[in-house]
Image (cartoon, rainbow, N blue to C red):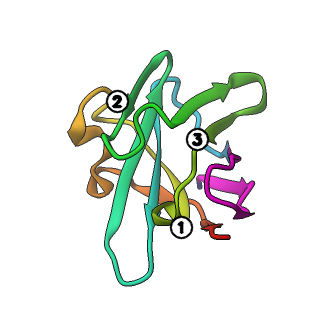
Amino acid sequence: QVQFVESGGGSVQPGGSLRLSCEVSGFFKDDYTIGWFRQAPGKGREGLSCINKDTTYYSDSVKGRFTISRDNTKNTVYLQMSSLKPEDTATYYCAIEHIFGCGSVWSTDPSIYFSWGQGTLVTVAL
């Protein structure tokens, strides 16, 4: 059973930065994709970024502001978020899939991910 430990959420002022972490355990295939998503109150889940080995992808809404990376020694994927805006306020989730890979808009479709973290809240406000 895949397990996640998400951390790093919090409150930050507009223009600030946060780094989210997603530690993954219980998955033993070498080829898998970790995606980051967010869901604001009253809205659907939005795909932001994914990473599979050295391949990454970013949605237009975060390209140039967010950076995804991974530390294989810690089984952890990070999402470095910079130049945060109030519209970035949401609960952020990481998730895993192992069939479709990462590299195009479909790779951040929530429906292809089979296991999800518990979420971490990010609030961007004065």
Q: Per the image, is 90 magenta?
A: no
Q: Position of residue 60 (x, y in %)?
A: 30, 40
Measured in 3D between alpha carbons, the distance from the residue under mark 1 to the one under mark 2, in whole angstroms, is 25 Å
Q: Which residue is mark 1?
A: 89
Determine whether the residue tagged by mark 1 lies in a helix, strand or loop. loop
Which of the two labelled residues, at mark 1 and mark 2, occupies the earlier sequence position? 1
Taken as a whole, is the magenta stretch helix, strand or loop?
A: strand
Instruction: Quickly name the residue at label 2.
Output: 102
Q: CA distance from mark 1 to mark 3?
A: 30 Å
Which residue corresponds to the image point at 55% horizontal and 68% vertical from the top-left? 91
Q: Residues within 10 Å of mark 1 (few under 14, many from 20)?
A: many
Q: What amino acid is found at the position of numbered circle 1 in the picture?
A: Thr
* Disc 3 to disc 2, C-alpha distance: 17 Å
Element on which disc 3 rests: loop
Residue type at mark 2 is: Cys
Residue 27 tag number? 3
Name the residue located 29 percent from the left edge and 39 percent from the top edge: 107
Point out the stretch of residues depicted in magenta: 2-23
**Quarter of the image holding residue 40?**
bottom left
The 10 Å Cα crowd at callout 2, few under 14, some 14 to 19, many 20 or more, is many
Residue at 63%, 36% in the rendered image: 77
Image position of 77 with respect to 54: above or below: below
Q: Earlier in the sequence, mark 3 or mark 2?
A: 3
